[in-house]
Amino acid sequence: MFRTSLVLTLYFIAIKADNDIKANPLPSFVQSCQRSSVNLNDCVQDSIESLIPMLSKGIPELFIPPLDPLHIPEVTLEENSGAVVFSSSYKNISVKGLSRFGISSVEVNPKIPEFRFKFYFPEIQIKANYSVTGKIMLMPLQGDGLVRANFTDVDATVLMTGRLIEKDEHKHIEVIKIHPEYTIGGSKVHLENLFNGDEKLGSAMNSFLNENWKSVSEEIRPIMEELMASMLDNTASKLFNAFSFDTLLPL
Ligand SMILES: *[C@@H]1O[C@H](CO)[C@@H](O)[C@H](O)[C@H]1NC(C)=O
Ligand SMILES: *[C@@H]1O[C@H](CO)[C@@H](O)[C@H](O)[C@H]1NC(C)=O
Ligand SMILES: *[C@@H]1O[C@H](CO)[C@@H](O)[C@H](O)[C@H]1NC(C)=O
């Protein structure tokens, strides 16, 4: 058995954070959905779909940062799980394509409450300054410079489980667990300046990473899912603090 350890540090996305629990009214552009409705799932899906055109610029009222591009100042990842032993940091990360998605399904169980969303992203492009040392699939990996990666046909499922807590005479959802999962149809990655700029080693490593992208992608799955969970939690927790359960899903 391999010991897995994972350290994730995320320096976030400056967004007006109001950590006070409030029972604000929903912004007028958000369509609310009655939790007892038989069409609850469709209603929530329509409601999210109507917000898609606003996502690239972000929706501060809903604590959603600008999503296209999404800018993340810095992420550091440390992982030790057998085949992957690495320490890496990424700065000035730019992610494009996150506002171009389709919703495949929405399931809301207001009694728990629990939410399951399925999304489809045709293409996600990532660019960042990277610095990495370690091993991936037993191959040494070292370098710092620019990394570009393109992922196509990404299906993502997010299961968010909460519980109801009472604050200021209002019920609010508290996030207990966020479980993201994804599958990737295709991937292309290029790391510049690997091995102190050694062209041969760098190009061999890039070919290796692209030829073995499925295995590589499995290796980094735990950290990617952790990263997605903390980003989603960042928005969801603020949203659930600002709007009561009865405001988000009225009876
Ligand atoms: C950060 O990335 C953006 C877009 O990728 C680029 O225009 C900008 O020059 C970068 N800034 C720094 C400090 O590297
Ligand atoms: C990212 O890399 C570019 C090109 O190598 C460099 O000009 C820029 O300063 C770097 N930005 C950061 C934030 O390290
Ligand atoms: C990603 O796609 C963009 C736009 O199609 C392209 O310019 C870029 O070279 C691609 N990057 C990689 C690593 O394939």
Image (cartoon, helix red, strand yellow):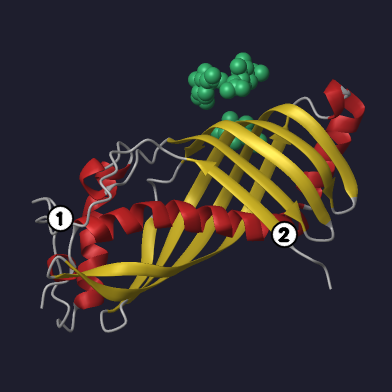
State whether residue 166 is above or below residue 190: below
Q: Classify 10 Å Cα crowding around label 1: few (below 14), some (14-19), many (20 and above).
A: few
State whether residue 28 is above or below residue 104: above
Q: Is mark 2 within 8 Å of ligand 2?
A: no
Rounded to the nearest angstrom, the CA distance separating label 2 from label 1 is: 40 Å
Q: Position of residue 7 (x, y in %)?
A: 65, 52
Quadrant in the picture for residue 31: bottom left
Per the rendering, the mark at residue 5 is: 2
Q: Taking 22 as reference, is 63 left or right?
A: right
Residue on which the image places disc 1: 30
Which of the two discs, 2 and 1, sits closer to the camera?
Answer: 2
Q: Position of residue 75 (x, y in %)?
A: 58, 40
Quadrant in the picture for residue 74: top right
Q: Position of residue 214 (x, y in %)?
A: 73, 58
Are dots 2 and 1 in contact, CB under 8 Å? no
Task: Tell me what residue is drawn at x 84 percent, y 73 percent.
Answer: 1
State whether residue 217 is above or below residue 87: below
Residue type indicated by callout 2: Ser
Task: Tell me what residue is drawn at x 42 percent, y 55 percent.
Answer: 232
